[in-house]
């Protein structure tokens, strides 16, 4: 019987992943709790390939054929100046004082640049979700639940959209274990572009997926409204002039009345004697004509006549015409007053049909937008520099550009490095998780090498982009890469390394 080699012994033993605080022991052939790392013959492997972004030709890149089967790509085909090493698949180093997994040097327009690349572990993170709909999905501050667990809440609505604020440290760590796990899974799914079923307390059921139409109470939303009722009056007043005696745009927020509105006054629209049951704000603009709901214009109305009082007999006349329409043009009705000045619905005249179509045409497709929001102003910075606040200052001074998976981010003013990024601008499946629970998101910091030295960067760990493209890893990494994959720069994303 031959003696066991040291490698045999290593293989038999579990190895310890120290890429996050969980510190999994992983047996050979198995993966850790997050499925991001595995033990392959005693070697720790980052299972997802390192994603390298290839520059588009119209952004100054070279024309390089994009091959199928890019899994097997060996890094040869892209010239280094047309390659950007993203943090997707780069791995993490933990604890944070260790240098980031890749600190990559490149030359752009004869200037030495450095990109610090790491998958950040974000315990403080969440998603802001914009849902293009007028429909009432639930009261502000109502809890949003997934599998019965609270994962966020309805927040302040925006123009033509409802908004959710999901995740955050209180749901990830401040509630029960299941709440944290479900919140993390919800954020991960949304950020990776998967659909998630949600329920708003005292509100609607939702199916939300980034870049897709929201599904509200089982119905896919088609259009985002053209504007509020007042804005719709303003936009289309001239088109209705002399075609109808009165127009009412029904809207939960601001219902517009043509004959009273400034737009109608300017073009000489005569009074109609109409009476709106709501709180008058300014001429021709009414608040609170009904309760919020999923009916006409985001109200609970199924019959818009419910918002009308009696017409003034001193002004209104039998036969007078009235168009009522919602802010998306989905609901519309045409009426004429009878002898008792009561509106009677009749068929929509041909002359008014183009105006309804014009409202529809001006509505954009309803989408769900998911923005990942996270704080990179914490310990993650120590992987970039020995003096973390220097990185924060460098970002604020616009000397360091922050990207997520190569995509541009919005940095909030104020302290820290609090960023927001549209998840559809990242490569697919760019997000991961660890069961602490926290989300793992790619982050890159790009700056001139001079500035990196000045902020106390880990300059001894800089490696050339050629070495990274050749598959080498830095000495600070305990893990190997499973491979590399390249993907094309999205047309809307600027090239991240610019002077
Ligand atoms: S959860 Fe993942 S990253 Fe964390 S120690 Fe385990 S395998 Fe490593």
Image (cartoon, rainbow, N blue to C red):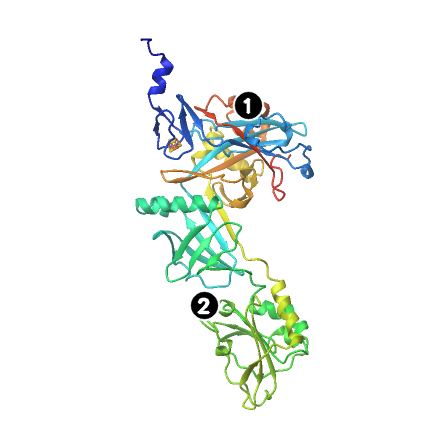
Q: Which residue occupies 37% across, 31% down?
A: 32
Q: Nearer the viewer, mark 2 or mark 1?
A: 2
Q: Are marks 2 and 1 in contact (CB under 8 Å)?
A: no
Quadrant housing residue 329: bottom right
Given residues 107 and 293, the one toward you in this image is 293
For residue 292, which numbered disc appears in the image?
2
Q: Which residue occupies 45% across, 70% down?
A: 300
Q: Which residue occupies 64% across, 66% down?
A: 358
Considering only vertical position in the picture, is 265 above or below 411?
below
Residue neighbourhood size for the residue with mark 2, other residues' Cα within 10 Å, grouped as few (<14), some (14–19), many (≥20):
many
Q: Earlier in the sequence, mark 2 or mark 1?
A: 2
Q: Is residue 355 left or right of residue 424?
A: right
Q: Does residue 422 appear in this view?
A: no
For residue 463, which numbered disc appears in the image?
1
Mark 2 and mark 1: span between their CA atoms?
58 Å
Task: Provide residue 276's location: percent of width, then percent of height.
Answer: 52, 79
Given residues 374 and 150, the one toward you in this image is 150
Considering only vertical position in the picture, is 6 above or below 418?
above
Quadrant housing residue 248: bottom right
Task: Provide residue 165's location: percent of width, then percent of height.
Answer: 44, 52
Q: SS for tag 2?
A: loop
Given residues 150 and 285, the one toward you in this image is 150
Considering only vertical position in the picture, is 278 above or below 199?
below
Ligand 1, by image quadrant, is top left
Image quadrant in which the C terminus is located: top right
């Amino acid at each position: 019987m031959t003696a066991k080699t040291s490698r045999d012994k290593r293989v038999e033993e579990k190895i310890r992943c120290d890429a996050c605080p969980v510190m999994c022991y992983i047996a050979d052939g198995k993966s850790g709790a997050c499925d991001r790392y595995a033990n392959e013959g005693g070697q720790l492997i980052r299972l997802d390939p390192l994603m390298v972004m290839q520059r588009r030709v119209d952004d100054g890149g070279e024309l390089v054929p994009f091959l199928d089967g890019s899994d097997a790509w060996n890094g040869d085909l892209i010239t280094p100046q047309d390659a950007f090493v993203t943090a997707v698949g780069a791995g993490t180093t933990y604890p944070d004082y260790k240098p980031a997994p890749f600190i990559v040097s490149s030359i752009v327009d004869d200037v030495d640049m450095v990109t610090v690349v790491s998958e950040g572990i974000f315990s403080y993170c969440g998603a802001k979700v914009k849902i293009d709909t007028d429909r009432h999905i639930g009261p502000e501050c109502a809890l949003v639940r997934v599998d019965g667990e609270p994962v966020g809440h309805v927040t302040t609505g925006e123009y033509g959209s409802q908004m959710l604020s999901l995740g955050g440290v209180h749901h990830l760590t401040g509630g029960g274990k299941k709440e944290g796990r479900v919140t993390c899974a919800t954020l991960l799914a949304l950020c990776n572009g998967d659909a998630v079923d949600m329920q708003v307390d005292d509100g609607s059921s939702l199916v939300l997926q980034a870049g897709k139409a929201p599904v509200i109470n089982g119905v896919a939303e088609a259009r985002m409204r053209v504007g509020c009722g007042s804005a719709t009056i303003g936009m289309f007043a001239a088109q209705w002039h002399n075609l109808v005696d009165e127009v009412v745009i029904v809207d939960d927020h601001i219902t517009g009345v043509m004959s009273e509105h400034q737009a109608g006054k300017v073009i000489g629209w005569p009074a109609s004697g109409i009476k709106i049951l709501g709180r008058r704000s300014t001429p021709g603009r009414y608040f609170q004509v009904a309760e919020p709901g999923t009916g006409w214009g985001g109200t609970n109305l199924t019959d818009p006549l419910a918002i009308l009082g009696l017409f003034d007999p001193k002004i209104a006349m039998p036969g007078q015409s009235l168009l009522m329409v919602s802010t998306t043009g989905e609901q519309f009705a045409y009426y004429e007053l009878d002898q008792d000045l009561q509106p009677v619905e009749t068929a929509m005249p041909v002359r008014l049909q183009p105006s309804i179509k014009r409202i529809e045409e001006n509505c954009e497709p309803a989408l769900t937008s998911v923005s990942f929001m996270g704080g990179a102003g914490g310990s993650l910075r120590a992987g970039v520099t020995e003096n973390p606040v220097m990185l924060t200052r460098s970002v604020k001074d616009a000397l360091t550009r922050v990207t997520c998976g190569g995509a541009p981010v919005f940095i909030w003013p104020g302290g820290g490095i609090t960023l927001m990024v549209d998840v559809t601008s990242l490569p697919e499946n760019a997000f991961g998780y660890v069961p602490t629970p926290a989300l793992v998101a790619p982050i890159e910091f790009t700056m001139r090498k001079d500035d990196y030295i000045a902020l106390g960067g880990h300059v001894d760990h800089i490696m050339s982009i050629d070495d990274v493209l050749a598959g080498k890893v830095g000495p600070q990494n305990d893990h190997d890469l499973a491979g590399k994959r390249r993907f094309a720069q999205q047309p809307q994303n600027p090239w991240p390394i610019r002077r």
